[in-house]
Image: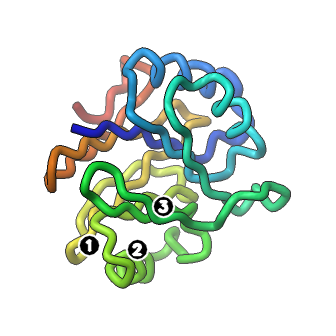
């Protein structure tokens, strides 16, 4: 079983970032993915996390030397990760889902909208963790070919889903 922590849109919110780093280390994720708009916070995360950190650049990360998207294999599942602004995810998820299908990805991770979401479009799980600057994140559990998304909040009183 592979457990992936997923965050996006931290937008210099140090308080939420520190809380997430503590949680990720406590949860002992296998890896963490930051989906952009961290304005350099990925460097801080890389130093403090006890697991590998993957990252892509968002529309507010123009000075960062990060790729706009990445394809990684976690467990046995191919995952596409992007911030989403280049695919107009605020309006539709269709272009991103088509791109994921073209790449053979079973999961497409994206941010940009600041709204948590987990839904299937075609055969692709579209997962947006929401904005870390609001205390929102996601966990992706990969067990063989089975992929289970969880949308969560660092504020335990506003848990989105188990």
At x 37% / y 61%, what residue is drawn? 79
Along the horizontal axis of the image, is 144 left or right of 160?
left
Q: Quadrant of the C terminus?
A: top left
Dot 2 or dot 3: first in sequence order is 3
Q: Secondary structure at mark 3?
A: strand
Tell me the CA gap for discs 2 and 3: 13 Å
Q: Is residue 140 above or below residue 47?
A: below
Tell me the CA gap for discs 1 and 3: 16 Å
Q: Please report contact status of discs 1 and 2: CB closer than 8 Å, yes or no.
A: yes
- The residue that disc 1 covers is 121
At x 61% / y 57%, what residue is drawn? 56
Q: Is residue 99 above or below residue 81?
A: below
- The residue that disc 3 covers is 81
At x 63% / y 22%, what residue is drawn? 48
Image x and y of residue 137, in percent: 45, 37
Q: Tag 2: Cα neighbours inside 10 Å, few (<14), some, or many (≥20)?
A: some
Q: Quadrant of the N terminus?
A: top left
The disc placed on residue 93 is 2
């Amino acid at each position: 079983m592979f457990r992936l922590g997923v965050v996006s849109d931290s937008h210099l919110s140090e308080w939420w970032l520190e809380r997430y780093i503590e949680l990720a280390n406590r949860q002992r994720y296998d890896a963490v993915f930051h989906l952009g708009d961290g304005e350099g916070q990925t460097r801080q995360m890389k130093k403090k996390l006890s697991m590998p950190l993957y990252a892509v650049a968002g529309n507010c990360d123009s000075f960062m030397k990060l790729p706009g998207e990445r394809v990684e294999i976690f467990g046995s599942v191919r995952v596409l990760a992007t911030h989403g602004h280049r695919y107009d995810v605020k309006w539709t998820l269709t272009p991103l889902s088509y791109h994921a299908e073209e790449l053979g990805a079973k999961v497409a991770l994206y941010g940009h909208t600041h709204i948590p979401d987990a839904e299937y479009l075609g055969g692709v799980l579209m997962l947006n963790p929401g904005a870390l600057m609001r205390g929102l994140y996601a966990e992706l559990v990969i067990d063989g070919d089975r992929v289970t998304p969880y949308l969560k909040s660092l504020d335990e009183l506003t848990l989105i889903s188990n």
